Image (cartoon, rainbow, N blue to C red):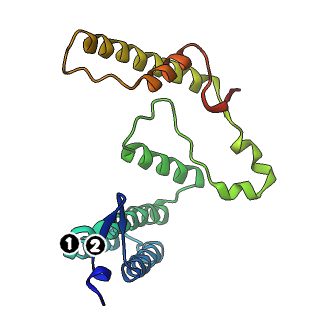
Amino acid sequence: MELKEKLIFKKNNKMEITEEQRKRWTENKEAWSNEAKTQIHTPEDLKKFADKLIEHCNKLNGADGYEETANATTALAYAAVEMCAEQFGLSGFQVGCIMWGIIDKLIMSEHDCGMKLLNYDLMLYPQYEDHFEKTIDLETWKKMQEKASEKYQEYLVEKAKENIGDERAFPACEEVAAHWKSIVYGNVPFGYKIE
């Protein structure tokens, strides 16, 4: 095997991985997911599974562990949900709440105006057309306008600082500020409609 095949290179800000790495990651991901679903029944099982995954990830080094650690962490979280479902039962609704709770805790960006998760496989079924309509409910729209107003006011303050020579000023770019202002004045973005 050539050296190039053994290393992960960055090219155009994307990690390049070898087929060998991709295969190993996929195999581990599938095995861990299967183990989480079929072999984790008690808190003790979960602890052993966690110890195993942590030991595996601690042996990895550098970029090689990048996807492996994410897959291991996902498998562990999934195992915890499966174990809880087996121990005291969870409805589909509760599992949905758990998913959104995890997303809410882990998401790295603002989401004061709400979030939406789309499963594009549902586009294969005509009864799900309403999931893909470009509509925003009135409550979400009002939150968006409030947030845009806050952002636009912050922009104006930063712009004023910049105009008087304050080097700490960091205003948003003009296009973003104009977008916020447009929302404040009632223009619904991106072709959405208020329902």
- The residue that appears at 28% across and 24% down in the rendered structure is 170
**Residue visible at 37% across and 25% down in the picture:** 172
Label pair 1/2, CB-CB below 8 angstroms: yes
Q: Which residue is mark 2?
A: 64
Disc count in the image? Answer: 2
Q: Toward the viewer: 150 or 79?
A: 150
Residue pointed to by mark 1? 61
Tell me where residue 5 appears, x and y as whole percent.
32, 82
Residue 17 seen by the camera = yes
Q: At 43% from the left edge and 64% from the top edge, which residue is drawn?
A: 78
Residue name at image x 44 percent, y 61 percent: 81
Q: Is residue 47 visible?
A: no
Mark pair 1, 2: CA separation: 6 Å
Q: Please tell me whether residue 84 is drawn above or below residue 7 in the rendered image.
A: above
**Which quadrant: the N terminus?**
bottom left
For residue 103, side relative to residue 1 (left or right): right
The amino acid beneath tag 2 is Asp
Q: Residue furthest bottom?
A: 1
Mark 1: few, some, or many residues within 10 Å (few <14, many ≥20)?
few
Measured as percent of width and height from the top left, residue 128 is found at 75, 49
Please provide percent x and percent y for residue 124.
75, 59
Q: Horizontally, is 91 left or right of 98 in the view?
A: right
Note whether 167 is above or below 121 in the view shown: above
Q: Residues within 10 Å of mark 2 (few under 14, many from 20)?
A: some
| Mark 1: amino acid | Asn
The mark found on residue 109 in the picture is: none
